Image (cartoon, rainbow, N blue to C red):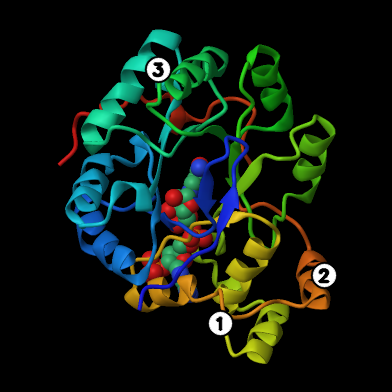
Amino acid sequence: MPITVPSLALSTGATIPAMGYGVYMMSSEEVREYLPQALELGYTHIDTANAYFNEVAVGEVIRGAGVAREQLFITSKLFPQSYPYDRCTADIDATLERMGLDYLDLLLLHQPYGDYVHGWRAMEEALRAGKVRAIGLSNFPIHKIAQVMEVAEIAPQVLQVEINPYWNQHALKRELASMGLGDIVFEGWYPLGHGDKALLADPVLAEIAAAHDKTTAQVALRWSIQEGNVVFPKASNLEHMRQNIDIFDFELADNEMARINALPQRPYYEVPEEPPAFVLVENDYTEQA
Ligand SMILES: NC(=O)c1ccc[n+]([C@@H]2O[C@H](COP(=O)([O-])OP(=O)(O)OC[C@H]3O[C@@H](n4cnc5c(N)ncnc54)[C@H](OP(=O)(O)O)[C@@H]3O)[C@@H](O)[C@H]2O)c1
């Protein structure tokens, strides 16, 4: 039986499934192999990006899956080359065309570099035109979110950043709330520390996992859900895919949440102020099988 995943409310009035399936670093072949299995297990929310070079394969799988479009929640993201206003509009259309979709449920500016202020205006236009149903930012620090807010007519509904038990983002959440953006929905990438063995063997997580007869990965994901975040672990192993969605039949107690929130905090990846080399590469997204 597919597992039913609870949803969170977006400020647009739409809802977003709290658990998704991330396809970062998956080739098109891997997407064609693993995504149908994920859909069968009950994953309905898929997180891709133009820079993942697998939008064609994601679109093909979901169109062929026999699942009604409105039952799915599809996110993509734009890399900074796409941010100048006219190019942004054209690249949103190109993503829709590559995926064979009439609309995306969520579109994010993927990286906080380049002409993101004009990119945001193009995203607002796409939202008004119904090409996307929600818009947001990924990896933006507070001062760059403030720059976007200076021109924004529509505030971001989602912020996708690293979140895991070792980087809980409480400080950023407090700062956003103080800017009047307390209703933004947080999505966590690296929910399992990118598979970090130390995180998956953390003694606090292991003790709590044993008490609930769950794995440390399940406890890390459940913690993030109870923190109010959306999570999308990436898994290519079927047992991992099964485990990761099987976290809605138990609850962490307040003292267990507090113990996890007391773990030492350090991000796996520090988003640099200036664009790193991988962001400056001129990608050709038409090169996809
Ligand atoms: N916006 C951004 O800049 C950004 C950056 C990074 C990631 N993301 C998004 O976040 C998603 C997840 O990130 P990620 O893949 O880097 O990290 P992750 O989900 O934290 O970790 C994935 C790793 O954990 C392993 N794993 C998965 N489930 C497991 C389980 N139950 N027990 C033990 N190991 C398990 C996977 O192995 P197997 O594959 O063998 O199952 C894989 O090696 C991406 O797919 C992407 O959608 C976004």
Q: Mark 1 points at which residue?
A: 215
Amino acid under disc 1: Thr
Q: Name the residue under label 3.
A: 88
Would residue 147 appear left or right of 287 to someone viewing this image? right
As drawn, 169 above or below 109: below
Q: Residue 9 in the image: x percent, y percent?
A: 60, 47
Q: Residue 185 in the image: x percent, y percent?
A: 63, 44
Front-lying residue, 32 or 66: 66
Front-lying residue, 5 or 262: 5
Amino acid under disc 2: Ala
Q: Name the residue under label 2.
A: 258
Q: Is residue 8 at all visible to an observer of this figure?
A: yes
Q: Is mark 1 on a helix, strand or loop?
A: loop
Residue at mark 2 to residue at mark 1: CA–CA distance: 18 Å
Binning the other alpha carbons within 10 Å of mark 1 as few (below 14), some (14 to 19) or many (20 upward) gives: some
Q: Is residue 72 at all visible to an observer of this figure?
A: no
Front-lying residue, 132 or 192: 132
Q: What element carries label 3?
A: helix
Amino acid under disc 3: Cys
Marks 3 and 1, the one that precedes in the sequence: 3
As drawn, 49 above or below 209: above
As drawn, 120 above or below 138: above
Q: In which quarter of the image is the N terminus?
A: bottom left
Q: Is mark 2 on a helix, strand or loop?
A: helix
Would residue 158 appear left or right of 235 to someone viewing this image? right
Marks 3 and 2, the one that precedes in the sequence: 3
